[in-house]
Image: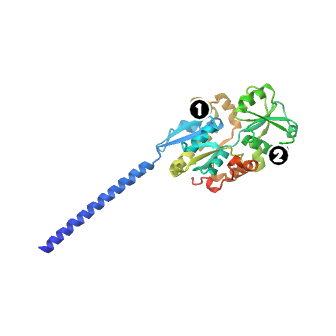
Amino acid sequence: MRKRLILVLCLIFSLVLVSCNNVEKKDSKENETNMENETMIKEVNFIYPAGAPAITTLKFRKDNEKIMDTKINYNMLKTTDLLVSKLVSKEADIAIVPTNLASKLYNKGLDYKLVGSSVWGVLYLVSDEKMDDINKLKGKDIYAIGKGLTPDILLRYVLKQNEIDPDKDVNITYLSGATELVPSYISGKAKIALMPEPMLSTVMAKKETNIILDFQSEFGNKQNRIGYPQVSIIARGDILKDKDFMNEFFKNYKESISYMNENKLEVKDLAKEFEIGINENIIIKSLDRIPMNFYYAKDIKDSLNDYLTILYDFSKESVGGNLPKDDFYYEDVK
């Protein structure tokens, strides 16, 4: 009798253990599911400045309200200060930025990596007179904006590459901004000027203008590169952890840019629909002078390093004090 009682008690104890184990497994699975739901990306804030960077987003924005059930919030900003503010406060998950700004953020220790580049320069030196010999620039006045900033650095670099001393052979006059440069050029006060697209197309629609130097070709010819990676895309560390989402996002972005390059007339309608602040007719005229192609950072590290080195050699602060190390680049893409 005693043996039978012990056997029954053992059986009951075993059943209780199995039941508890099943409850623990169920709770564990529920916890795992809850954790997955908590870490799942529900929304991504994608920011970018007006101008050429905004043009690269048009087809992508049209086709991608969501990617893999993640909502994309698009936000075009009109000033660099607003752009920086959003990045510093971590309100931006993915952003299109000037490449040197990406380097500055890296040097400040902010958790963003450079994923790729999409705009390969938009700067042109132009004149209201034909100039068949670059040496005829010597002794001339060149009007520009942004003293000490990227356009100024690249102007000086390109002039030196053509054996023209920017401090001795020419006189560079700096104006306060586009609102001063454009009327000065159209009125004839500034006969030679450094202009970016799409500003250049706006001017060319009002005045006969000759392109003296195409900075993109100059950089490509001298450095044996495809141009200079003026604009890049960065992403925050938390977002980069979702590799499937990142791969899908940038696959679609790359395909969208390729589509616009092949179907330029459609860009006009997209620009009007999303109100990017540039006349749609001007955009069509400027597209041939805005080299848009997306390349992953892992495939263009030499071009990125060359470009940042040029800026660094002129002013260390233009890239944030130091050239970025390899961990600046995000390489875990398909």
Q: Which residue is mark 2?
A: 160
Q: Secondary structure at mark 2?
A: helix
Q: What amino acid does circle 2 point to?
A: Lys
Q: Nearer the viewer, residue 130 or 13?
A: 13
Horizontal side of residue 26 vs 155, given as left or right: left
**Proximity of marks 1 and 2: CB atoms separated by less than 8 Å:** no
Q: Position of residue 247 (x, y in %)?
A: 54, 49
Q: Nearer the viewer, residue 148 or 67?
A: 148
Horizontal side of residue 80 vs 9, given as left or right: right
Q: Secondary structure at mark 1?
A: helix
The residue shown at (77%, 47%) is 221
| Extreme residue toward the left, this view | 1
N-term mark: 1 or 2? 2
Q: Which residue is mark 1?
A: 270
Split into 4 quadrants, where in the image is the N terminus? bottom left
Q: What amino acid does circle 1 point to?
A: Leu
The residue shown at (53%, 47%) is 248
Evaluate whether residue 123 shows in this view.
Answer: yes
